[in-house]
Image (cartoon, rainbow, N blue to C red):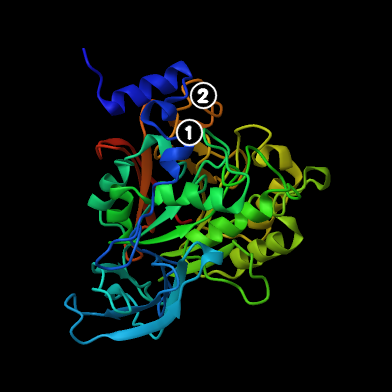
Amino acid sequence: MQLSRRAFLRLAGKAGLAAPFAFGASACALGTAGRFDADTGLSLGYVTGDVTPDGAVVWLRAQPESSVSIQYGKDATLVSSASAGPIRVAGDSDFTAKLLLSRLDPATVYYYRAAVAGKKPGLVGKFVTAPTADATAVVKFCFGGDTREGYRPFTIMDAIRAKRPDFFVHLGDTIYADRNFIASELPQFWSKYRTNRDDPPSQRLFSETSVYAIWDDHEVRDNYEAGHPLAAIGQRAFLDYWPVRRDGSEPNRIYRSFRWGRALELFLLDGRQYRERAKGTMLGSRQKEWLLDGLARSSALFKIVATPVPFYGGGRDRWEAYARERSDVMRWIEEKKITGVVFVSADLHYAAVARIPGRLGLKEIVTGPLAAQLNVFGVGYSESVEFFANKTFNYAMITIDPEAAPSQMLVEILDEENRSLYKTRIDAL
Protein backbone atom coordinates (compact mmCIF):
# COMPACT_ATOMS: atom_id res chain seq x y z
CA MET A 1 0.00 0.00 0.00
CA GLN A 2 1.32 3.43 -0.91
CA LEU A 3 1.05 5.94 1.92
CA SER A 4 -0.27 9.43 1.40
CA ARG A 5 2.10 12.25 2.19
CA ARG A 6 0.09 13.19 5.29
CA ALA A 7 0.02 9.61 6.59
CA PHE A 8 3.78 9.32 6.04
CA LEU A 9 4.42 12.48 8.06
CA ARG A 10 2.42 11.12 10.95
CA LEU A 11 4.17 7.78 10.88
CA ALA A 12 7.54 9.45 10.59
CA GLY A 13 6.74 11.49 13.67
CA LYS A 14 5.76 8.37 15.61
CA ALA A 15 8.98 6.67 14.60
CA GLY A 16 11.09 9.69 15.44
CA LEU A 17 12.30 10.03 11.84
CA ALA A 18 13.61 13.22 10.30
CA ALA A 19 10.54 13.38 8.07
CA PRO A 20 11.30 16.76 6.49
CA PHE A 21 14.34 15.33 4.70
CA ALA A 22 12.07 12.88 2.90
CA PHE A 23 10.59 15.76 0.99
CA GLY A 24 13.76 17.53 0.08
CA ALA A 25 13.82 20.42 2.59
CA SER A 26 17.52 20.87 2.01
CA ALA A 27 19.73 23.90 1.70
CA CYS A 28 19.26 23.71 -2.05
CA ALA A 29 15.47 23.68 -1.77
CA LEU A 30 15.50 26.53 0.73
CA GLY A 31 17.41 28.72 -1.69
CA THR A 32 14.76 28.46 -4.43
CA ALA A 33 11.80 29.84 -2.47
CA GLY A 34 10.51 33.36 -2.89
CA ARG A 35 11.00 34.04 -6.57
CA PHE A 36 9.49 37.28 -7.87
CA ASP A 37 6.51 37.18 -10.19
CA ALA A 38 7.46 38.70 -13.53
CA ASP A 39 4.12 40.47 -14.00
CA THR A 40 3.67 41.98 -10.53
CA GLY A 41 7.21 42.10 -9.14
CA LEU A 42 5.86 40.59 -5.91
CA SER A 43 6.80 37.45 -3.99
CA LEU A 44 5.22 35.25 -1.29
CA GLY A 45 1.84 36.97 -1.01
CA TYR A 46 0.81 39.41 1.70
CA VAL A 47 0.43 39.20 5.46
CA THR A 48 -1.70 41.77 7.28
CA GLY A 49 -1.24 42.01 11.01
CA ASP A 50 -1.45 43.90 14.30
CA VAL A 51 -4.90 45.13 13.34
CA THR A 52 -6.59 47.76 15.52
CA PRO A 53 -9.95 49.55 15.15
CA ASP A 54 -8.31 52.19 12.93
CA GLY A 55 -5.19 50.62 11.45
CA ALA A 56 -3.28 47.62 10.17
CA VAL A 57 0.22 46.67 9.03
CA VAL A 58 0.67 45.03 5.62
CA TRP A 59 3.77 42.90 5.00
CA LEU A 60 4.99 42.21 1.48
CA ARG A 61 8.09 41.37 -0.52
CA ALA A 62 8.92 43.05 -3.83
CA GLN A 63 11.63 43.10 -6.49
CA PRO A 64 15.02 44.48 -5.41
CA GLU A 65 15.12 48.28 -5.13
CA SER A 66 11.57 48.61 -6.47
CA SER A 67 9.04 51.18 -5.29
CA VAL A 68 5.84 49.66 -3.92
CA SER A 69 2.57 51.02 -2.53
CA ILE A 70 -0.70 49.63 -1.14
CA GLN A 71 -4.11 50.48 -2.56
CA TYR A 72 -6.93 49.87 -0.07
CA GLY A 73 -10.62 50.53 0.43
CA LYS A 74 -14.01 49.05 1.36
CA ASP A 75 -14.87 47.98 -2.18
CA ALA A 76 -13.31 44.78 -3.53
CA THR A 77 -12.87 46.41 -6.93
CA LEU A 78 -10.65 49.14 -5.42
CA VAL A 79 -11.99 51.55 -8.04
CA SER A 80 -12.11 54.21 -5.35
CA SER A 81 -9.21 53.58 -2.99
CA ALA A 82 -6.72 55.21 -0.68
CA SER A 83 -2.99 54.60 -0.92
CA ALA A 84 -0.12 53.92 1.50
CA GLY A 85 3.43 54.47 0.36
CA PRO A 86 5.24 54.31 -1.92
CA ILE A 87 8.32 52.97 -0.20
CA ARG A 88 11.45 51.45 -1.70
CA VAL A 89 12.44 47.93 -0.71
CA ALA A 90 16.07 47.14 0.00
CA GLY A 91 18.37 44.20 0.53
CA ASP A 92 18.97 44.87 4.22
CA SER A 93 15.49 43.47 4.93
CA ASP A 94 15.53 40.80 2.20
CA PHE A 95 13.40 43.13 0.05
CA THR A 96 10.49 42.93 2.46
CA ALA A 97 8.44 45.96 3.49
CA LYS A 98 5.75 46.84 6.01
CA LEU A 99 3.25 49.57 5.22
CA LEU A 100 0.88 51.07 7.78
CA LEU A 101 -2.75 51.57 6.81
CA SER A 102 -4.30 54.26 9.00
CA ARG A 103 -7.56 56.16 9.53
CA LEU A 104 -9.60 53.01 9.00
CA ASP A 105 -13.13 52.46 10.27
CA PRO A 106 -13.69 49.92 13.05
CA ALA A 107 -15.34 46.52 12.49
CA THR A 108 -15.06 46.96 8.73
CA VAL A 109 -13.86 44.67 5.94
CA TYR A 110 -11.07 46.26 3.92
CA TYR A 111 -9.67 45.13 0.59
CA TYR A 112 -6.14 45.88 -0.54
CA ARG A 113 -3.43 45.06 -3.05
CA ALA A 114 0.20 45.93 -3.60
CA ALA A 115 1.44 47.71 -6.69
CA VAL A 116 5.08 47.83 -7.74
CA ALA A 117 5.86 50.87 -9.87
CA GLY A 118 5.77 49.93 -13.56
CA LYS A 119 4.17 46.54 -12.88
CA LYS A 120 0.72 45.03 -12.89
CA PRO A 121 -0.99 45.27 -9.43
CA GLY A 122 -1.00 42.16 -7.29
CA LEU A 123 -3.96 40.08 -6.21
CA VAL A 124 -6.55 41.57 -3.85
CA GLY A 125 -6.47 40.57 -0.19
CA LYS A 126 -8.80 41.43 2.67
CA PHE A 127 -9.02 41.73 6.46
CA VAL A 128 -11.44 43.08 9.07
CA THR A 129 -10.59 45.83 11.53
CA ALA A 130 -11.21 45.40 15.25
CA PRO A 131 -14.39 46.76 16.83
CA THR A 132 -14.07 49.63 19.31
CA ALA A 133 -13.73 48.82 22.99
CA ASP A 134 -17.40 49.51 23.72
CA ALA A 135 -18.79 47.49 20.79
CA THR A 136 -20.78 44.30 21.42
CA ALA A 137 -19.55 42.49 18.31
CA VAL A 138 -19.08 38.72 18.30
CA VAL A 139 -15.38 37.87 17.97
CA LYS A 140 -14.07 34.63 16.45
CA PHE A 141 -10.41 33.78 16.08
CA CYS A 142 -8.14 30.78 15.60
CA PHE A 143 -4.70 30.01 16.99
CA GLY A 144 -1.91 27.47 16.87
CA GLY A 145 1.84 27.09 16.67
CA ASP A 146 4.73 25.13 15.20
CA THR A 147 5.19 25.22 11.42
CA ARG A 148 8.21 23.28 10.18
CA GLU A 149 9.09 23.70 6.50
CA GLY A 150 9.44 20.00 5.70
CA TYR A 151 5.76 19.48 6.49
CA ARG A 152 4.57 21.74 3.68
CA PRO A 153 2.02 22.14 2.33
CA PHE A 154 0.54 23.36 5.61
CA THR A 155 -2.90 22.07 4.66
CA ILE A 156 -4.32 22.95 8.07
CA MET A 157 -4.17 26.61 7.01
CA ASP A 158 -6.94 25.89 4.51
CA ALA A 159 -9.00 24.36 7.31
CA ILE A 160 -8.54 27.53 9.37
CA ARG A 161 -9.44 29.71 6.39
CA ALA A 162 -12.67 27.76 5.92
CA LYS A 163 -13.78 28.90 9.39
CA ARG A 164 -13.46 32.56 8.36
CA PRO A 165 -11.94 33.84 11.60
CA ASP A 166 -11.63 37.54 12.36
CA PHE A 167 -7.92 36.93 12.89
CA PHE A 168 -5.33 34.19 13.44
CA VAL A 169 -2.73 34.02 16.20
CA HIS A 170 0.56 32.23 15.49
CA LEU A 171 1.95 31.22 18.87
CA GLY A 172 5.57 30.71 17.91
CA ASP A 173 8.01 28.35 16.24
CA THR A 174 6.99 30.14 13.07
CA ILE A 175 10.10 28.60 11.50
CA TYR A 176 12.58 25.92 12.58
CA ALA A 177 15.92 27.66 12.13
CA ASP A 178 17.69 24.90 14.07
CA ARG A 179 16.42 21.85 12.19
CA ASN A 180 17.53 20.22 8.93
CA PHE A 181 19.22 23.06 7.08
CA ILE A 182 20.45 25.01 10.13
CA ALA A 183 20.54 28.79 9.90
CA SER A 184 23.47 30.61 11.44
CA GLU A 185 23.64 33.83 9.37
CA LEU A 186 20.94 36.37 8.57
CA PRO A 187 20.47 35.35 4.89
CA GLN A 188 19.95 31.77 6.03
CA PHE A 189 17.29 32.82 8.55
CA TRP A 190 15.57 34.81 5.79
CA SER A 191 15.73 31.73 3.60
CA LYS A 192 13.88 29.74 6.25
CA TYR A 193 11.09 32.32 6.30
CA ARG A 194 10.90 32.41 2.51
CA THR A 195 10.49 28.65 2.46
CA ASN A 196 7.69 28.67 5.03
CA ARG A 197 5.92 31.57 3.35
CA ASP A 198 6.24 29.86 -0.05
CA ASP A 199 3.25 27.74 0.95
CA PRO A 200 -0.05 28.08 -0.95
CA PRO A 201 -2.37 27.23 1.99
CA SER A 202 -0.62 29.82 4.18
CA GLN A 203 -0.81 32.43 1.46
CA ARG A 204 -4.51 31.75 0.99
CA LEU A 205 -5.20 32.12 4.71
CA PHE A 206 -3.10 35.27 5.07
CA SER A 207 -4.82 36.85 2.07
CA GLU A 208 -8.20 36.62 3.83
CA THR A 209 -7.53 37.27 7.50
CA SER A 210 -5.04 39.16 9.64
CA VAL A 211 -2.35 37.66 11.88
CA TYR A 212 -0.84 38.35 15.29
CA ALA A 213 2.51 36.56 15.57
CA ILE A 214 4.87 35.87 18.45
CA TRP A 215 8.08 33.88 18.52
CA ASP A 216 9.56 31.02 20.53
CA ASP A 217 12.84 29.10 20.60
CA HIS A 218 13.01 27.54 17.13
CA GLU A 219 13.19 30.96 15.51
CA VAL A 220 16.74 30.87 16.95
CA ARG A 221 17.83 27.66 18.71
CA ASP A 222 16.12 24.97 20.77
CA ASN A 223 15.35 26.16 24.33
CA TYR A 224 17.57 29.25 24.03
CA GLU A 225 17.63 32.06 26.61
CA ALA A 226 18.52 35.74 26.53
CA GLY A 227 22.13 36.35 25.54
CA HIS A 228 22.36 33.60 22.92
CA PRO A 229 24.77 34.79 20.19
CA LEU A 230 22.19 34.19 17.43
CA ALA A 231 19.23 35.72 19.27
CA ALA A 232 19.56 39.18 17.73
CA ILE A 233 19.86 37.73 14.22
CA GLY A 234 16.86 35.47 14.70
CA GLN A 235 14.84 38.35 16.08
CA ARG A 236 15.72 40.60 13.18
CA ALA A 237 14.62 37.96 10.68
CA PHE A 238 11.36 37.44 12.60
CA LEU A 239 10.61 41.16 12.54
CA ASP A 240 11.54 41.35 8.85
CA TYR A 241 9.02 38.65 7.97
CA TRP A 242 6.01 39.35 10.21
CA PRO A 243 3.77 42.46 10.30
CA VAL A 244 4.63 43.44 13.87
CA ARG A 245 4.15 47.08 14.80
CA ARG A 246 7.44 48.61 15.88
CA ASP A 247 7.58 50.52 19.15
CA GLY A 248 9.57 53.74 18.75
CA SER A 249 11.09 53.54 22.23
CA GLU A 250 11.75 49.79 22.04
CA PRO A 251 11.99 48.77 18.36
CA ASN A 252 12.68 45.09 19.11
CA ARG A 253 9.67 44.70 21.37
CA ILE A 254 7.45 41.74 20.51
CA TYR A 255 5.05 41.70 23.48
CA ARG A 256 1.94 43.81 22.87
CA SER A 257 -1.84 43.83 23.36
CA PHE A 258 -4.93 44.38 21.20
CA ARG A 259 -8.55 45.08 22.08
CA TRP A 260 -11.48 43.54 20.16
CA GLY A 261 -14.65 45.18 21.44
CA ARG A 262 -16.21 44.38 24.80
CA ALA A 263 -15.44 40.72 24.17
CA LEU A 264 -11.68 40.49 24.27
CA GLU A 265 -8.27 41.91 25.05
CA LEU A 266 -5.41 39.84 23.68
CA PHE A 267 -2.06 39.95 25.49
CA LEU A 268 0.81 38.59 23.37
CA LEU A 269 3.87 37.63 25.42
CA ASP A 270 7.55 37.38 24.52
CA GLY A 271 8.80 34.32 26.38
CA ARG A 272 12.36 34.40 25.00
CA GLN A 273 13.97 37.80 24.71
CA TYR A 274 14.01 38.59 28.43
CA ARG A 275 14.20 35.20 30.11
CA GLU A 276 17.05 34.55 32.52
CA ARG A 277 16.91 31.29 34.42
CA ALA A 278 19.44 32.49 36.99
CA LYS A 279 17.12 35.38 37.90
CA GLY A 280 14.00 33.25 37.76
CA THR A 281 12.31 35.38 35.13
CA MET A 282 10.79 34.59 31.77
CA LEU A 283 9.20 37.97 31.19
CA GLY A 284 11.75 40.39 32.60
CA SER A 285 10.65 43.18 34.94
CA ARG A 286 9.31 45.58 32.30
CA GLN A 287 7.16 43.03 30.46
CA LYS A 288 5.90 41.58 33.74
CA GLU A 289 4.79 45.01 34.96
CA TRP A 290 3.13 45.67 31.59
CA LEU A 291 1.19 42.39 31.79
CA LEU A 292 0.01 42.81 35.37
CA ASP A 293 -1.02 46.41 34.84
CA GLY A 294 -2.77 45.57 31.57
CA LEU A 295 -4.77 42.74 33.10
CA ALA A 296 -5.86 44.92 36.00
CA ARG A 297 -6.93 47.82 33.78
CA SER A 298 -8.70 45.82 31.08
CA SER A 299 -12.48 46.09 30.94
CA ALA A 300 -12.83 43.30 28.36
CA LEU A 301 -14.99 40.31 29.30
CA PHE A 302 -12.10 37.99 28.50
CA LYS A 303 -8.39 38.66 28.85
CA ILE A 304 -6.56 36.07 26.79
CA VAL A 305 -2.86 35.70 27.56
CA ALA A 306 -1.05 34.21 24.56
CA THR A 307 2.21 32.67 25.70
CA PRO A 308 4.58 30.75 23.39
CA VAL A 309 5.19 28.12 26.08
CA PRO A 310 2.57 26.64 28.42
CA PHE A 311 1.77 28.50 31.62
CA TYR A 312 1.03 25.30 33.48
CA GLY A 313 3.04 22.10 33.05
CA GLY A 314 5.27 21.01 30.21
CA GLY A 315 8.80 20.91 31.66
CA ARG A 316 11.78 23.12 32.40
CA ASP A 317 11.67 25.21 29.24
CA ARG A 318 8.17 26.38 30.16
CA TRP A 319 6.67 28.41 33.00
CA GLU A 320 7.12 25.44 35.30
CA ALA A 321 10.80 26.41 35.64
CA TYR A 322 9.80 29.97 36.62
CA ALA A 323 7.40 29.01 39.38
CA ARG A 324 7.86 32.18 41.45
CA GLU A 325 7.08 34.47 38.54
CA ARG A 326 4.10 32.31 37.62
CA SER A 327 2.86 32.53 41.21
CA ASP A 328 3.23 36.31 41.09
CA VAL A 329 0.95 36.45 38.05
CA MET A 330 -1.66 34.18 39.63
CA ARG A 331 -1.56 36.03 42.94
CA TRP A 332 -2.06 39.37 41.15
CA ILE A 333 -5.10 38.02 39.29
CA GLU A 334 -6.57 36.82 42.58
CA GLU A 335 -5.79 39.96 44.59
CA LYS A 336 -7.17 42.28 41.93
CA LYS A 337 -10.21 40.03 41.38
CA ILE A 338 -9.56 39.97 37.62
CA THR A 339 -12.17 37.90 35.83
CA GLY A 340 -12.15 36.19 32.44
CA VAL A 341 -8.42 35.37 32.26
CA VAL A 342 -7.58 32.44 29.97
CA PHE A 343 -4.12 31.28 28.90
CA VAL A 344 -3.45 29.93 25.39
CA SER A 345 -0.22 28.34 24.22
CA ALA A 346 1.43 25.89 21.84
CA ASP A 347 4.97 24.39 21.77
CA LEU A 348 4.23 20.91 23.18
CA HIS A 349 3.16 19.41 19.83
CA TYR A 350 -0.08 18.11 21.27
CA ALA A 351 -3.44 19.58 22.21
CA ALA A 352 -4.76 19.87 25.74
CA VAL A 353 -7.22 21.77 27.90
CA ALA A 354 -6.07 22.01 31.50
CA ARG A 355 -7.39 23.34 34.76
CA ILE A 356 -4.64 25.36 36.41
CA PRO A 357 -4.44 24.33 40.10
CA GLY A 358 -5.54 26.97 42.59
CA ARG A 359 -8.61 28.82 43.80
CA LEU A 360 -8.97 30.94 40.68
CA GLY A 361 -10.36 28.25 38.40
CA LEU A 362 -8.09 29.36 35.55
CA LYS A 363 -7.80 27.31 32.38
CA GLU A 364 -5.20 26.91 29.67
CA ILE A 365 -5.77 25.80 26.08
CA VAL A 366 -2.76 24.20 24.42
CA THR A 367 -2.85 23.48 20.71
CA GLY A 368 -0.65 22.31 17.89
CA PRO A 369 1.31 21.40 16.07
CA LEU A 370 -0.04 23.07 12.97
CA ALA A 371 2.55 21.23 10.90
CA ALA A 372 5.44 19.59 12.73
CA GLN A 373 6.34 16.29 14.38
CA LEU A 374 3.64 15.06 16.74
CA ASN A 375 4.60 14.48 20.36
CA VAL A 376 3.44 10.88 20.52
CA PHE A 377 5.27 10.39 23.82
CA GLY A 378 3.36 13.19 25.53
CA VAL A 379 1.02 11.96 28.25
CA GLY A 380 -0.65 15.23 29.19
CA TYR A 381 -0.24 17.47 32.17
CA SER A 382 -1.76 15.56 35.08
CA GLU A 383 -5.13 14.79 36.55
CA SER A 384 -6.01 18.44 35.82
CA VAL A 385 -6.33 17.76 32.10
CA GLU A 386 -9.84 17.86 30.67
CA PHE A 387 -8.75 16.96 27.15
CA PHE A 388 -5.61 15.59 25.52
CA ALA A 389 -4.84 14.61 21.90
CA ASN A 390 -1.53 13.90 20.16
CA LYS A 391 -2.49 11.94 17.05
CA THR A 392 -3.19 14.70 14.53
CA PHE A 393 -2.26 18.24 13.53
CA ASN A 394 -4.69 20.64 15.18
CA TYR A 395 -5.64 24.21 16.00
CA ALA A 396 -8.11 25.94 18.30
CA MET A 397 -10.97 28.33 17.64
CA ILE A 398 -12.52 30.69 20.17
CA THR A 399 -15.87 32.45 19.75
CA ILE A 400 -17.06 35.13 22.19
CA ASP A 401 -20.51 36.74 22.13
CA PRO A 402 -20.57 39.67 24.60
CA GLU A 403 -24.36 39.76 24.58
CA ALA A 404 -24.79 36.12 25.52
CA ALA A 405 -26.02 35.42 29.04
CA PRO A 406 -24.08 34.29 30.90
CA SER A 407 -20.92 35.65 29.27
CA GLN A 408 -18.98 32.68 27.89
CA MET A 409 -16.37 31.79 25.35
CA LEU A 410 -16.80 28.74 23.20
CA VAL A 411 -13.55 26.82 22.71
CA GLU A 412 -13.22 24.22 19.98
CA ILE A 413 -10.17 22.19 19.00
CA LEU A 414 -10.20 20.95 15.41
CA ASP A 415 -7.99 18.78 13.25
CA GLU A 416 -6.68 19.45 9.75
CA GLU A 417 -9.95 18.20 8.21
CA ASN A 418 -11.97 20.49 10.50
CA ARG A 419 -13.28 17.57 12.48
CA SER A 420 -14.10 18.68 15.99
CA LEU A 421 -11.88 17.00 18.59
CA TYR A 422 -13.22 18.78 21.66
CA LYS A 423 -15.59 21.56 22.71
CA THR A 424 -15.96 23.40 25.98
CA ARG A 425 -17.31 26.65 27.37
CA ILE A 426 -15.51 28.96 29.76
CA ASP A 427 -17.37 31.50 31.86
CA ALA A 428 -16.15 35.07 32.14
CA LEU A 429 -16.81 35.10 35.90
Counting from the top left corner in percent of width and height, residue 11 is at 37, 19
Q: Mark 1 points at which residue?
A: 349
Q: Which amino acid does label 2 sit on?
A: Gly
Extreme-top residue of the structure: 1
CA gap between label 1 and label 2 equals 8 Å
In this rendering, the answer to whether 288 lies above or below 198 is below
User: 108 or 139: which is nearer to us?
Assistant: 108
Q: How many marks?
A: 2
Q: Neighbour class for label 1 at 10 Å: few (<14), some, many (≥20)? A: many
Q: Residue 378 carries which label?
A: 2
Q: Do the residues labelled 1 and 2 touch (CB within 8 Å)?
A: yes
Q: Which of marks 1 and 2 is in front?
A: 1
Q: Residue at x 39, y 47 (%)?
A: 32
Q: Which residue is drawn at 52% across and 34% down?
A: 348
Q: Which mark is residue 171?
A: none
Q: In this view, does 86 lie to the left or right of 265?
A: left
Counting from the top left corner in percent of width and height, residue 202 is at 33, 51
User: 184 or 211: which is nearer to us?
Assistant: 184
Q: Is residue 69 left or right of residue 184?
A: left
Residue 44 visible in the snapshot: yes
Counting from the top left corner in percent of width and height, residue 144 is at 43, 45
Q: Quadrant of the N terminus?
A: top left
Q: In this view, does 368 lie to the left or right of 339?
A: left
Q: Is residue 214 left or right of residue 420?
A: right
Extreme-right residue of the structure: 278
Residue 133 visible in the snapshot: no
Q: Which amino acid does label 1 sit on?
A: His
Q: Is mark 2 on a helix, strand or loop?
A: loop
In this rendering, the answer to whether 47 lies above or below 7 is below
Q: Is mark 1 on a helix, strand or loop?
A: loop
Quadrant hosting residue 235: bottom right
